[in-house]
Amino acid sequence: MVLSEREQVIRDFADAHGWSAADIEPILGDASFRRYFRVVEPSRGAILMDAPPPEEDPKPFIDVARYLTAQGLRAPDIFAADAEAGLVLLEDFGDARMRETVDAGDAEAERAIYRTAIETLVELHQRPPADVPAYDRAVYQREAGLLTEWYCPARGLEVDADGYAAAWNAVLDGMDPAAPQVTVLRDYHSENIMLPPDGSQGLIDFQDALIGDPAYDLVSLLQDARRDVSEALEAEMLAHYRDLARPDYDFDTAYHVLGAQRNAKIVGIFVRLWKRDGKPRYPTMIPRVWAAMERDLRHPALAPVARWFDAHIPAELRDPAGTLGGKFAL
């Protein structure tokens, strides 16, 4: 079989690092330009990440993985890397993800797995922060703005984007300045938590980590865009976090503000993945995300943003029944 130029680069990289006898098999990718391969020999295996430049840079992933490992957390070991070529050979956690495992189990198994995931965050938040940029006002605004940039045009809505940004500024001004600054993985959810055979929980997809509020990754986990988390389980796990971490700032407000911010971002990203990148499965998840955002918007601290939504996005266009994907053609 004749290999493409990129496939030959991947093959040469594996060969150069002692895997010349391995089969290289593609596996499911994600929403980015990255691709993943399973590198398989009879007695061992690894994952090969292909993060091709200039679209991707694997160095942040490598740096955060090494930080997490140094802090005693379960990130994949890095076996070899060529950051300039965009290639990383790393530990294979297997195929068992939190999402499928929880969905196939009973309520007690779900609670146990979520409790462990909460305890991992508590442990992370007790460690010195990683050497990564800050999750600052500009990032929050840029992310929240994805909703007006992508979702509103898909709905045929012309909205006051400046007023939207002003509403978010008013809300963010009310955040507790005493909030501790911790490493925020930013995509800490059921499809990015692996369950290796050793019984641990392995972390993946953390290359976009920033320093910010502890509540953000709780939102990512408990208001998961990819599976339903009951409000009862969400409340129980938040209580578990509070019992262990003892947050001494206005954690409740932070949780709902960052919940609304993250969910607005995800709605925009999912429409972008559909409209720009031709990935039609993503709009089907928007109703779940929107429902969580509506709950967050009921918190008094979100009043300025809630008023903007009420003025600019009619209730019937908030995608309560998943109508977006069916109403608009690619």
Image (cartoon, rainbow, N blue to C red):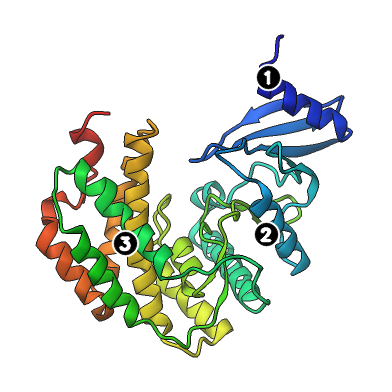
Helix, strand or loop for disc 3: helix
Label pair 3/2, CB-CB below 8 angstroms: no
Residue 166, position in %: x, y? 24, 70
Residue 72, position in %: x, y? 76, 68
Q: Residues within 10 Å of mark 3 (few under 14, many from 20)?
A: many
Type of amino acid under label 3: Ala
Instruction: Single out the mark in the foreground, 3 or 1.
Output: 1
Q: Quadrant of residue 28?
A: top right
Q: Which mark is residue 5?
A: 1
Residue visible at 62% across and 45% down in the picture: 57
Q: Earlier in the sequence, mark 3 or mark 1?
A: 1
Q: Residues within 10 Å of mark 2 (few under 14, many from 20)?
A: many
In the rendered image, the vertical position of residue 292 relative to residue 129, given as above or below: above
Type of amino acid under label 2: Val
Query: As drawn, is 31 to the left or to the right of 159?
Result: right
Type of amino acid under label 1: Glu
- Marks 3 and 2, Cα distance to the nearest angstrom? 29 Å
Furthest toward the bottom, the residue is 248
Q: Residues within 10 Å of mark 1 (few under 14, many from 20)?
A: few
Residue visible at 75% across and 44% down in the picture: 90
In the rendered image, the vertical position of residue 251 relative to residue 118, given as above or below: below
Numbered marks: total:
3
Label pair 2/1, CB-CB below 8 angstroms: no
Q: Is residue 263 visible?
A: no
Helix, strand or loop for disc 1: helix
Q: Which residue is mark 2?
A: 64
Instruction: Single out the mark in the foreground, 3 or 2.
Output: 2
Furthest toward the top, the residue is 1
Q: Which residue is mark 3?
A: 292
- Marks 3 and 1, Cα distance to the nearest angstrom? 44 Å
Q: Earlier in the sequence, mark 3 or mark 2?
A: 2
Helix, strand or loop for disc 2: helix
